Amino acid sequence: MKTDTLFLAVMVFLVVYWEVAFDGVRRLLGVQVDLLPSLMVYAGLTQGIGGVTLVAVAGGLLLDAVSANPLAVSVGPLFLAGLVVHLARELVVRDQPFAQAVMGAAAGFGSSLLVLLLLLTLGETPILGWGTLWQMAVLTIGSAVSAPLWFVCFGWLNRTFAYRRAPETTFRSDREIRRGR
C-alpha cells in the first residue's frame, strides 16, 4: 500500500469522525458540511481506481452507519463523483486551486443531489423545502472550499512522512573515462 493511500484511508475515518463528533458547524449554519465529496476529488486526481473505490466504499459506509441514511446509499454517488474526476484527470490542470475548487463544488452538489434522489427512489421521506436549497448551497460551497485544502494537507503529509526519491547524479556508471597524453 502506497503511503498516500494509507494517509487517504486514515483521513476518510477522521473526516467521518469529525462530521459526527463536532457539530459546531451544524449549529452555526444549520447544515453539517460534508467533506467526503471534496476528498473524492483529491482521490480521483491523484489515485488510481483502487483509491477512488476505497474512499467511496469506506467513506460511504462509515457515513451511512452513523447517519439516518439507509446503509450504502452514499457509496454510489461518492464513487460516481470520484470516477468522473478520475476519468477526466488528464484534461484538468490538477495543480490549480481554482480547478480543484470547481471540481469540488461539482462533486459536492452532484453527490448530495444523487443521494437525495436515491432516498426518494427508495421510498424514504426526506424533508424537502426552501431549506433544501440552503443545504445544497452550503454543501456545494463547503466542498469547493475544502477541495484545494486536501491538496495542501496531503502535500504536507507526503513531504513530512514519505520518503523522497534520491536525486540522480550526473555520473553514469557505464561511462568510460579516457586518460591520455
Image (spheres, rainbow, N blue to C red):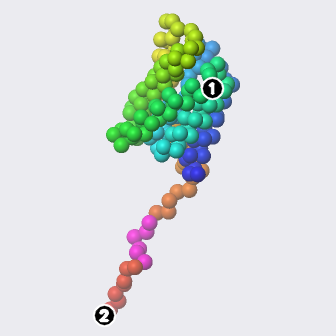
Residue at 41% from the left image edge and 74% from the top image edge: 171
Pinpoint residue 127: horizontal percent, then vertical percent.
56, 9
Residue at 49% from the left image edge and 25% from the top image edge: 111
Assess disc 1: are there few (<14), some (14-19) or many (≥20) residues with their C-alpha within 10 Å of its C-alpha: some
Q: Earlier in the sequence, mark 2 or mark 1?
A: 1
Q: Quadrant of residue 32?
A: top right
User: Is residue 119 depicted above or below 65 in this figure?
Assistant: above
Residue at 56% from the left image edge and 46% from the top image edge: 5
Q: Is residue 167 magenta?
A: no
Q: CA distance from mark 2 to mark 1?
A: 81 Å
Please name the predominant secondary structure of the magenta segment in the image.
Answer: loop
Q: Secondary structure at mark 2?
A: loop
Q: Amino acid at mark 2?
A: Arg
Pinpoint residue 122: horizontal percent, then vertical percent.
55, 18
Report whether residue 61 is seen: yes
Assess disc 2: are there few (<14), some (14-19) or many (≥20) residues with their C-alpha within 10 Å of its C-alpha: few
Q: Secondary structure at mark 1?
A: loop
| Residue named by callout 2 | 181
Q: Which residues are magenta?
A: 168-173
Label ID, residue 71: 1
